[in-house]
Amino acid sequence: MAGSNLIPAIQLSLRAGVAAGLAIIVARLFQLQHPLYAMISAVIVTDLVAEQTRKLALPRLAGTLLGSSLGALISTLLPPGVWATAFGIFAAMFASHLLYLQDAAKVAGYVCGIVLLDHTDSSWSYALFCMIETALGIGAAICVSIVPKLIKPKRPAE
């Protein structure tokens, strides 16, 4: 890896690590059930450019809201199992497209699948905490993205 490419890699890795750590600390401070979602969201939406972090945050939040809500709803209508999970993933991803949320489709699908696969006994509670923890991780990533880059990459000689 060339030296000029190393600096952005270090900075992105540092930002993601700090955002994830911050999200985990706050999630534990508030004794949230699944700090994993705060950590995942912080890492996934972190970018070196603050605008891009915010841009990545919206589909992540929308997909989590749609997927967790749809998963909780389907869990009250269908018995748990493989077919309910497969249907939920399909429904969440297809609904994302119908709602013009194409960038949120995969997140909606896998979050819905997680609700249906492993949390049908407390699906609405799980959906709520999933949303809170995801928003927390996104907030941590946005906060870290505001901090200016510590090292500016050298510009090539003109």
Image (cartoon, rainbow, N blue to C red):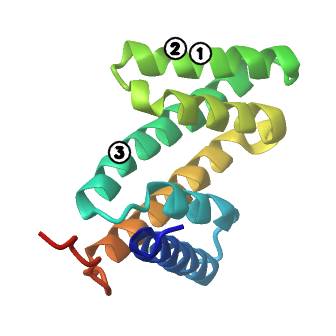
18 relative position to 24: left or right: left
Closest to the observer, 41 or 7: 7
Label located before the other in sequence (2 or 3):
3
Q: How many marks?
A: 3
Q: Is residue 44 visible?
A: yes
Image quarter (top left, top right, bottom left or bottom right) of the C terminus = bottom left
* C-alpha gap between disc 1 and disc 2: 5 Å
Looking at the picture, which amino acid does disc 1 mark?
Ala
Q: Position of residue 136 (x, y in %)?
A: 47, 65
136 relative position to 119: left or right: left
Look at the picture and state if 19 lies above or below 76.
below
Residue at the spot 52% in from the left edge and 51% down from the top edge: 131
* C-alpha gap between disc 2 and disc 3: 18 Å
Closest to the observer, 112 or 151: 151
Residue at the spot 28% in from the left edge and 62% down from the top edge: 49
Instruction: Verify CB contact (< 8 Å) between mark 1 and mark 2.
Output: yes
Looking at the picture, which amino acid does disc 3 mark?
Leu
Q: What secondary structure is found at the residue carrying circle 2? A: helix
Closest to the observer, 78 or 96: 96
Residue 58: give its label. Answer: 3
Q: Which residue is mark 2?
A: 94
Image quarter (top left, top right, bottom left or bottom right) of the N terminus = bottom right
Q: Which residue is mark 1?
A: 91
Looking at the picture, which amino acid does disc 2 mark?
Phe
Q: What secondary structure is found at the residue carrying circle 3? A: helix
Q: What secondary structure is found at the residue carrying circle 1? A: helix
Q: Tell me where residue 58 sits by quadrant.
A: top left
Look at the picture and state if 74 lies above or below 24.
above
Q: Position of residue 39 (x, y in %)?
A: 60, 65
Label located before the other in sequence (3 or 1):
3
